Amino acid sequence: MKIDIYIYHLISINQTTKKLLHTIEILFNFQRYRTRDNLFYTYTRQLLKQTIDIVYKYGNYNETLFIINHVLRCPPGIHQWATNFVRFLLPTSLEILCSPMYIRYVAHFLATLLFPIKNRDIFLQNWLGENGETIPQISSLPATQNQQQWMLIDADGQERAALLRWDTLNEDDLIALLNQFNLNYLMKILFSLNDQQRQQIISYENTVRILAILDLFVEILCRGFDTYADSQYKTFHKHIGKMIR
């Protein structure tokens, strides 16, 4: 098909271009429409993987965050197919980890995952329900029509209300996405230094910088408690707490 030829041509260039990013944007838009043709999803997601691989191989920090922003604006259930599209770029040295450019990248990566997802409802306005109905407008419906409420039992045996809604990601999605942030690797770089590296790096200035980086990480992680404050995210809250600890 012509679309295959066009996309394979973009991939063969081995660089991130505006046309490639626009193609990825269109492929993500396809994921925001419901269809009973599962082959359509399989085909378009395969194309997404091939094009996204090019971005992570040749793109810059901002272009990888472009991918993550589109993943977050897909319908709930992205942990089943899109987790691998969210890739945290790892530093190869302490110097890179402490560089202003990489610190900004880490801050933006975490903030993208944990801050409120801007205009998510607009991106999903064409999402169709199982019977073909358009997703209800949240602001225009009474509470009884706007959301279905179910009573679930959590891991502690306590009942909790869970709102089944399309305007936010579910807990499995959030946990899967946050797991892509490899905090353990960063801590290993920070604290697994040999004696020579300690003498070269552990100065007053660098110590303050490292503490500032850790404080920034914790501050952004804590924002996740505010963004997803509903009780249905109880396990996600515990997951954030373990990372902070």
Image (spheres, rainbow, N blue to C red):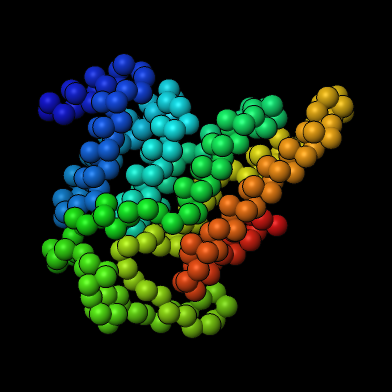
Residue 54 percent location from the top left of the image? 38, 26
From the viewer's side, name the closer residue of 22 and 13. 22
Q: Is residue 42 visible?
A: no
Residue 24 x, y percent position in the rendering:
28, 35
Q: Position of residue 136 (x, y in %)?
A: 21, 68
Residue at 13 percent across and 63 percent down: it is 132
Identity of the residue furthest to the top in this view: 13
Q: Is residue 239 left or right of residue 6?
A: right
- Give 26 or 84, whichever is nearer the viewer: 26
Q: Is residue 233 left or right of residue 132?
A: right
| Number of callouts | 0
Position of the N terminus, as image quadrant, is top left
Q: Residue at position x 41%, y 42% from top? A: 68
| Residue at position x 16%, y 29% in the image | 3
Rendered position, 35 above or below 144 = above
Q: Is residue 180 above or below residue 24?
A: below
Residue 97 rendering spot, x and y as whole percentages: 65, 32
Query: In this view of the protein, which residue sits in the foreground, 43 or 192?
Result: 192
The quadrant where residue 151 appears: bottom left
In the image, is residue 81 above or below residue 1? below
Asked if one can make out residue 163 in the rendered structure from this viewpoint, the answer is yes
Left/right placement of residue 208 relative to residue 13 reads right
Q: Residue at x 34, y 44 (%)?
A: 70
| 200 on left or right of 147 | right
Q: Quadrant of the C terminus?
A: bottom right
Q: Nearer the viewer, residue 157 or 210?
A: 210
